[in-house]
């Protein structure tokens, strides 16, 4: 709420009415015809990347390579879809293979950073981030600068502008339609994301593995002392995180784009991987909260996309997201601080945070 | 001779490396005080857009309006850094998540693009831009002409900044205090150094440097505005600080090395030199290089030997020691 007020101030300050802008935002996100369906389209990848970030961040393993892992997942899933779909396999098998290939691709890409962190103690923040750019260039290269398997090489359009091959029909993921608001299609990816959330919840709060991961995140020294295998956990968690991000890529190919989209203004302009980190942080790394937050942020993004134009400022979506995140971060600290204050009040009188201006 | 591949790549490398150099100097100051600022990219973009806007609006002689642009960019970068400093120093929020939040808030799809759109900056070239300051005859000297004398004022100013930061860190009392704050904030506090003030000051300075780095895109390298013009160089700058083992003089070397790598790709293509999938490896090379360097730098306890501030990324809470 504080964030909404703040962004209202920003809007007013730059001469856009705050209230009408927000109403437009809300309408375009959830109310107007077909809006919910579009919001789901935007929310599905965010749910995956949010879960991916949550899985890793819970262990204080800052995998910010969700973006690149998504690209690689899309590449491997597209390869599986093109190959198996092209060989006439039944649709269910092709889709299953795409899901597996996407997860494997993302997991493998994330494991580069995971291995480096586990065995060379290299900061996974920078490596996973640098790998995002490498993956981006690889994706662009496959379609724009080479005659790769993924590129459409015949037909008139392909000569004018390089595009990826269309997925065969067997590799198009189904969607369930709810007849409301002119039809809301629930993509298969959204269902998979929900399953992943349940799986992640189970893994982290009901298994020994999850317990150890949480201890490692909160207190690595205690974990070492208790004899937990740090390296294995790092490898496993990075692979899980990357795998989930790879699913986002697979879902992009299977659910929505039906081709390997390397257009610099397409999938790469959406920044699903980075936004997923916002989603995970807002959800405080709780898998179910990730789904909810992904839906809300997805609505925001969808609204931003539909409304972008003369009377609606571009970049507002990022601003609002940032402000929400600031408020959440600040608020969390205030809560924590209040607890600490009461605990320490008896011991020493000056409250700690007043030492700054 | 001056058009040979090596000379061109080196000359361009210095030009391309300049924003990296400014940004990494700023990041170095912040990290030396123990603050890991992952919001550099966002601060650069806001600096880029503000500097560009200032130059478009101020109707003054070219050097004056450019100077105003650079100052405006520095102030804008520092303003964004103030948000960051408030979150991570005063409120002690997680530095990593806060840094990402800053980049999302200010970055490609955030404030920088919002401001640019609002102020209608796209699709017009900069009213003034930094030009090479030495006369043409000097620039035409073999080899050193284009590399050393073919640059603009921002490049020479960045050399000055490197020297100043070096002197500050190693030859002044506040510099010594700064290093103490980054290594052992509790001891520094016990010595009477105001840890929080030092961290605030150097985070703001870091933001100002990042803003100037952004302006060196929009006022020198590519004198125009487009969303996300910095293309991830804020992130490279963060890696560069590690690459440079937290030393300003090595930041210079690293920045020019990365600048040269960035210059290499289009030059190879323009000269029709193909070595394998040229486009792919030349454009991905700076990023892969960063990873390799990081691995080398982090292997076998080298981190401690090469001077990572011990308290980097750790919020300082007086009573918890």
Image (cartoon, grey):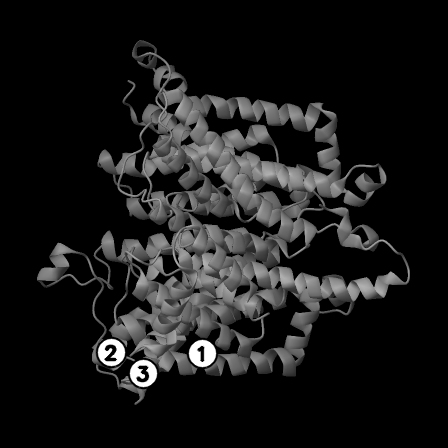
What SS does tag 3 mark?
strand
Mark-to-mark CA distance, 1 and 3: 15 Å
The percent coordinates of residue B44 (x first, y second) are: 47, 42
Q: Are marks 2 and 3 in contact (CB under 8 Å)?
A: no
- The mark nearer the N terminus, 2 or 1, is 2
Q: Position of residue A185 (x, y in %)?
A: 31, 83
Residue A96, numbered circle: none
> Which mark is first along the chain, 3 or 1?
3
Foreground residue among B19 and A149: B19
Q: CA distance from mark 2 to mark 3?
A: 23 Å
Up-down relation of residue B94 to residue B199 (above or below): below
Disc ID at residue A85? 2
Q: Is residue B310 left or right of residue B64?
A: right
How far apart marks 2 and 1 lie (CA) works out to 23 Å
Name the residue: 65% across, 71% down: A213
- Relative to B83, residue A234 above or below: below
Q: Nearer the viewer, residue A32 or B154?
A: A32
Instruction: Judge left or right: residue A7 versus residue B84.
Output: left
Q: Residue furthest right?
A: A347
Taking the spot 41% from the left edge, 73% from the top edge, the residue there is A43
State which chain disc 3 sits on: A
| Quadrant where the N terminus of chain B is found in the figure | top left
* Residue pointed to by mark 1: A193
Q: Is residue A334 left or right of residue A145?
A: right
**SS of the residue under disc 1:** helix
Graded by Cα atoms within 10 Å as few (under 14), some (14 to 19) or many (20 or more), the crowding at tag 2 reads: many
Say which element carries label 2. helix
For residue B265, what is the image quadrant? top left
Q: Which residue is mark 3?
A: A185
Instruction: Pinpoint residue A236: horizontal percent, then vertical percent.
Output: 57, 69
Q: Tell me where residue B119 sits by quadrant.
A: top left
Residues at discs 2 and 3 both on one chain: yes
């Amino acid at each position: 709420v504080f964030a909404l007020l703040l962004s209202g101030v920003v809007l007013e300050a730059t001469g856009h009415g705050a209230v009408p802008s927000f109403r437009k935002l809300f309408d375009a996100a959830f109310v107007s015809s077909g809006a919910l369906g579009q919001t789901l389209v935007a929310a599905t990848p965010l749910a995956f990347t949010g879960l991916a970030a949550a899985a890793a961040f819970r262990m204080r393993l800052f995998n910010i390579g969700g973006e690149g892992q998504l690209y690689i997942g899309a590449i491997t899933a597209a390869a599986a879809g093109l190959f198996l779909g092209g060989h006439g396999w039944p649709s269910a098998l092709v889709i299953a293979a795409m899901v597996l290939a996407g997860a494997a691709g993302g997991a493998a890409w994330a494991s580069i950073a995971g291995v480096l962190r586990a065995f060379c103690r290299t900061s996974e923040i920078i490596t996973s981030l640098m790998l995002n750019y490498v993956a981006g260039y690889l994706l662009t290269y496959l379609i724009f600068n080479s005659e790769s398997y993924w590129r459409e090489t015949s037909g008139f359009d392909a000569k004018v502008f390089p595009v990826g091959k269309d997925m065969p029909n067997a590799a198009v993921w189904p969607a369930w339609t709810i007849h409301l608001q002119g039809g809301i299609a629930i993509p298969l990816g959204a269902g998979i994301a929900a399953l992943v959330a349940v799986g992640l919840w189970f893994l982290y709060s009901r298994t020994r593995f999850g317990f150890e991961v949480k201890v490692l995140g909160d207190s690595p020294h205690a974990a070492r002392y208790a004899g937990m295998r740090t390296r294995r956990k790092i490898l496993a968690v990075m692979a899980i995180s990357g795998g989930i991000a790879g699913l986002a890529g697979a879902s992009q190919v299977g659910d929505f784009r039906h081709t390997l989209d390397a257009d610099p203004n397409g999938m790469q302009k959406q920044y699903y991987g980075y936004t997923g980190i916002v989603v995970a942080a807002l959800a405080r790394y709780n898998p179910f909260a990730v789904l909810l937050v992904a839906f809300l942020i997805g609505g925001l993004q969808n609204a931003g996309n539909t409304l972008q134009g003369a009377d609606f400022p571009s970049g507002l979506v990022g601003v609002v997201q940032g402000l929400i995140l600031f408020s959440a971060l600040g608020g969390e600290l205030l809560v924590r601080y209040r607890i600490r204050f009461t605990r320490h009040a008896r011991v020493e009188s000056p409250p700690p945070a007043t030492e700054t201006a | 001779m001056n058009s040979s591949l090596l000379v061109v790549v080196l000359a361009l490398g210095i030009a391309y490396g300049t924003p990296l150099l400014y940004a990494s100097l700023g990041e170095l100051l912040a990290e030396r005080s123990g603050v890991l600022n992952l919001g550099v990219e966002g601060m650069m973009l806001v600096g880029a857009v503000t500097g560009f806007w200032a130059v478009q609006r101020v109707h003054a002689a070219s050097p004056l309006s450019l100077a105003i642009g650079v100052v405006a960019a520095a102030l804008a970068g520092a303003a964004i850094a103030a948000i960051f400093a408030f979150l991570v120093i005063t409120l002690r929020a997680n530095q990593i998540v806060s840094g990402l939040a800053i980049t999302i808030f200010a970055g490609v799809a955030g404030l920088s693009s919002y401001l640019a759109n609002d102020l209608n900056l796209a699709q017009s070239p900069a009213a003034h831009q930094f030009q090479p300051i030495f006369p043409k005859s000097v620039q035409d000297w073999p080899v050193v002409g284009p590399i050393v004398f073919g640059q603009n004022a921002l490049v020479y100013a960045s050399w000055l900044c490197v020297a100043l930061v070096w002197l500050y860190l190693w030859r002044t009392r506040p510099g010594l205090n700064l290093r103490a704050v980054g290594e052992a904030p509790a001891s520094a506090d016990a010595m009477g150094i105001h840890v929080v003030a030092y961290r605030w000051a150097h985070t703001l300075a870091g933001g100002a440097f990042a803003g100037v780095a952004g302006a060196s895109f929009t006022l020198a390298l590519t004198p125009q505005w487009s969303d996300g013009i910095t293309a991830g160089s804020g992130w490279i700058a963060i890696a560069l600080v590690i690459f440079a083992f937290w030393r300003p003089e090595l930041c210079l070397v690293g920045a020019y090395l990365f600048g040269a790598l960035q210059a290499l790709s289009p030059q190879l293509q323009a000269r029709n030199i193909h070595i394998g999938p040229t486009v792919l490896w030349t454009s991905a090379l700076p990023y892969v290089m960063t990873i390799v360097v990081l691995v080398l730098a982090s292997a076998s306890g080298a981190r401690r030997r090469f001077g990572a501030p011990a308290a980097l990324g750790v919020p300082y809470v007086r009573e918890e020691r």
